[in-house]
């Protein structure tokens, strides 16, 4: 009996001790005198994985107590819980998206000082070899990133910017919000992302093996980056410093680093080739005839990618743009051979989130001209490119089109609102774990007394003010390219006006015959120069007066397909007839029409809306410039110019 009483007493004492332990170790609120680190540890001790239920996928990592280093990667187990849209995910549910081995390390440079760490990891098989898998629906690969929003307290900057870039058409990393548990401790909201890598679903360029050291094999693919140099950077082995001839005035010579193939895998012939290609490209860019479409920078650089990259950088006005986290890739010559700008990367210090660089908190002003001959100076490439009227006009054309179709304010607002709804519960847990709202985190500019809603408002205000400023200040004129054709025997000469072909490798599938007789096909396409190519057809076409050609946007620098005149319009075997060049500008409720051959203008022109409804008709004087007042609402319109011998349609945007 005494033994039984002693056991009961011990059980009661144990229960009371456990109860007291729970009571005194569970802080509901971070007290003012508690540091973030102390509160975080208390929170983790209580808010363990067993309590986590989320609408976001849950990523669970177990290193079995091993600390995660900067490098090399250590082995760990990882599981992902994703029960699908509309279903909650709870720790304890089966690992139904992924369950297996990974190698993991801390990633980043300046961000490594934050207590919330970002990680790079690779999926592996049981033997420790790389294993390509699909994570959360993203295409299969083995290299991944867990981005840890910390200094960006809105947790929006990277994801929203990548979404804009994706809508612009180029590859950019895919992103999925998730919550992370590391060694049974809650870590907060993360973003699962793809690492920049050569892959058919990422940077889609040709594979470059160590034995490919000559011919077309040697010409691609390559990925090069401009970024901070690692402490162990070795000149020649890891990269090189450019030295263009002639030099660009007051500009820093650029450090280029090998990215793919990696420095320890690229062979000397490949190092030499890509270094020489970049050097030749720079020399063309700084040369006196840099704007020549056949011999200048266009011969080496993919113009549309450089324009989109610049516009995205300018939207964010991120302090490191054109300086760090800047990537380029080059195709094999057989695929076109051009140097592309991208993929875009790292925008968490953009949109006013920087206190040590005054221009970064001002939504006005351009970033690309800020070229200085200092170690932290930006690349001069885009400043030089904007000195070419064609590049400048094409950038203006692209911007107006994006703002009317792709990067519309309402669309961007919708993306942000959907993210806020999607992360509503998770962001509360994140800031309970990391109570940094209203506290300074390097390099925040606007942070005092801020709530999460304040952080979102600050980001949105900068973004939309910036977009509006760019609408009103982007230089240049809108380009309206067109295609004309003429025939001789079984060949059609295609002439591109006011634009240039983007690469010398042309595909038959990028040209379409319209109103062609049955059986007539294109046999080959020959690139002649930046403005002309020659189609060889299966039979003589001189009598097919209704025949026209549609040229795909894939072949030239603009972003829309172009349809030519019909052959009968200009006459077979006659010299190529060029239409008058008509430019249209709208500002302050006035339409300004400029024409290089005013004597060819019709007596009047018509305005058509995108729905096809006529919005107005006005008279024209045969002068080089006509000014027409209007009361049109904001939107896209088409101006129709018709004479007995020709007609031309010019797109116009009305922006307020």
Image (cartoon, helix red, strand yellow):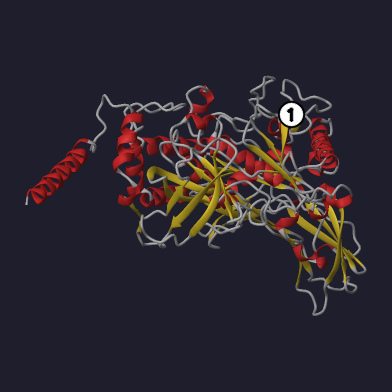
| Front in this rendered view, residue 477 or 142 | 142
- Give the percent coordinates (x, y) of residue 274: 80, 40
Please name the residue shown 74% across and 54% down the image: 482
379 versus 340 height, above or below:
above
Neighbours of disc 1 within 10 Å: few (<14), some (14-19), many (20+): few
Task: Name the residue beneath numbered marker 1.
Answer: 234
Q: Is residue 99 above or below residue 374?
A: below
Most extreme residue toward the bottom, as rendered? 518
Horizontal side, residue 651 vs residue 492: left or right:
left
Front residue of 58/156: it is 58
Q: Position of residue 550 (x, y in %)?
A: 74, 63
**Residue 122 vertical placement versus 247 (above, below):** below
Relative depth, front residue between 198 and 290: 198
Please tell me which residue lies in front, 179 or 621.
Answer: 179
Q: Position of residue 131 (x, y in %)?
A: 61, 56
Which residue of the protein is positioned furthest toward the left in this rendering?
1
Please indicate whether residue 341 sits to the left or right of residue 613 in the image: right
Residue 363, can we see it?
Answer: no
Percent from the top left, x then y, of residue 637? Answer: 57, 54
- The count of marks equals 1
Q: Is residue 413 left or right of residue 53?
A: right
Which residue is most to the front?
2
Q: Is residue 43 visible?
A: yes
Compared to 594, does 493 lie above or below? below
Q: Secondary structure at mark 1?
A: loop
């Amino acid at each position: 009996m005494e033994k039984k009483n002693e056991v009961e007493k011990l059980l009661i004492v144990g229960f009371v001790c456990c109860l007291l332990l729970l009571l005194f170790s569970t802080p509901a609120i971070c007290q003012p005198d508690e540091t973030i680190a102390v509160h975080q540890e208390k929170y983790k001790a209580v808010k363990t994985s067993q309590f986590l239920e989320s609408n976001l996928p849950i990523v669970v990592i177990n290193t079995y107590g091993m600390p995660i280093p900067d490098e090399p990667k250590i082995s760990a187990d990882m599981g992902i819980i994703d029960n699908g849209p509309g279903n909650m995910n709870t720790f304890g549910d089966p690992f139904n998206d992924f369950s297996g081995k990974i190698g993991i390390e801390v990633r980043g440079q300046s961000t490594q000082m934050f207590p919330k760490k970002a990680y790079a990891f690779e999926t592996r098989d049981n033997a420790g070899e790389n294993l390509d898998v699909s994570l959360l629906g993203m295409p299969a690969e083995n290299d991944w990133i867990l981005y840890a929003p910390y200094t960006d307290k809105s947790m929006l900057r990277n994801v929203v910017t990548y979404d804009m870039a994706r809508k612009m058409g180029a590859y950019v990393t895919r992103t999925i919000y998730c919550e992370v548990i590391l060694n049974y401790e809650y870590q907060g909201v993360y973003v699962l992302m793809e690492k920049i890598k050569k892959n058919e679903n990422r940077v889609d360029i040709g594979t470059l093996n160590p034995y490919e050291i000559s011919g077309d094999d040697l010409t691609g693919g390559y990925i090069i980056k401009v970024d901070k140099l690692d402490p162990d950077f070795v000149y020649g082995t890891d990269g090189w410093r450019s030295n263009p001839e002639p030099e660009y005035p007051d500009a820093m010579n650029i450090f280029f680093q090998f990215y793919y193939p990696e420095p320890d895998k690229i062979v000397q012939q490949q190092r030499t080739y890509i270094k020489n290609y970049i050097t030749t490209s720079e020399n063309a860019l700084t040369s006196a005839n840099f704007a020549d479409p056949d011999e200048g920078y266009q011969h080496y650089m993919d113009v549309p990618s450089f324009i989109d990259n610049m516009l995205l950088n300018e939207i964010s006005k991120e302090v490191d743009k054109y300086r760090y986290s800047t990537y380029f890739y080059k195709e094999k010559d057989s695929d076109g051979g051009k140097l592309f700008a991208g993929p875009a990367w790292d925008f968490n210090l953009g949109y006013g989130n920087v206190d040590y660089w005054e221009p970064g908190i001002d939504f006005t002003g351009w970033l690309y001209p800020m070229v200085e001959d200092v170690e932290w100076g930006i690349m001069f490439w885009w400043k030089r490119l904007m000195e070419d009227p064609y590049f400048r006009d094409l950038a203006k054309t692209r911007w107006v089109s994006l703002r009317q179709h792709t990067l519309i304010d309402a669309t961007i607002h919708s993306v942000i609102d959907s993210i806020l709804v999607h992360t509503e519960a998770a962001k509360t847990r994140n800031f309970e774990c990391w109570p940094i709202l209203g506290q300074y985190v390097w390099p925040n500019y606007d942070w005092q007394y801020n709530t999460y809603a304040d952080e979102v408002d600050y980001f949105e205000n900068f973004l939309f003010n910036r977009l509006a400023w760019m609408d009103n200040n982007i230089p240049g004129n809108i380009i309206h390219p067109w295609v004309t054709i003429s025939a001789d025997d079984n060949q059609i000469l295609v002439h591109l006006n006011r634009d240039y072909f983007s690469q010398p490798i042309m595909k038959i599938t990028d040209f379409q015959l319209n109103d062609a007789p049955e059986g007539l096909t294109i046999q080959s396409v020959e690139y002649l120069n930046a403005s002309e190519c020659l189609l060889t057809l299966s039979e003589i076409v001189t009598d097919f007066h209704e025949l026209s050609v549609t040229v795909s946007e894939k072949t030239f620098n603009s972003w829309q397909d172009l349809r030519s005149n019909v052959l009968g319009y200009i006459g077979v075997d006659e010299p190529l007839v060029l239409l008058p060049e008509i430019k249209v500008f709208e500002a302050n409720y006035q339409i300004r029409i400029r024409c290089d051959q005013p004597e060819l203008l019709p007596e009047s022109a018509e305005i058509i809306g995108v729905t096809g409804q006529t919005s107005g008709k006005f008279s024209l004087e045969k002068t080089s410039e006509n000014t027409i007042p209007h009361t049109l609402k904001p939107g896209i319109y088409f101006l129709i110019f018709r004479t007995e011998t020709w007609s031309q349609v010019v797109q116009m945007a009305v922006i307020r």
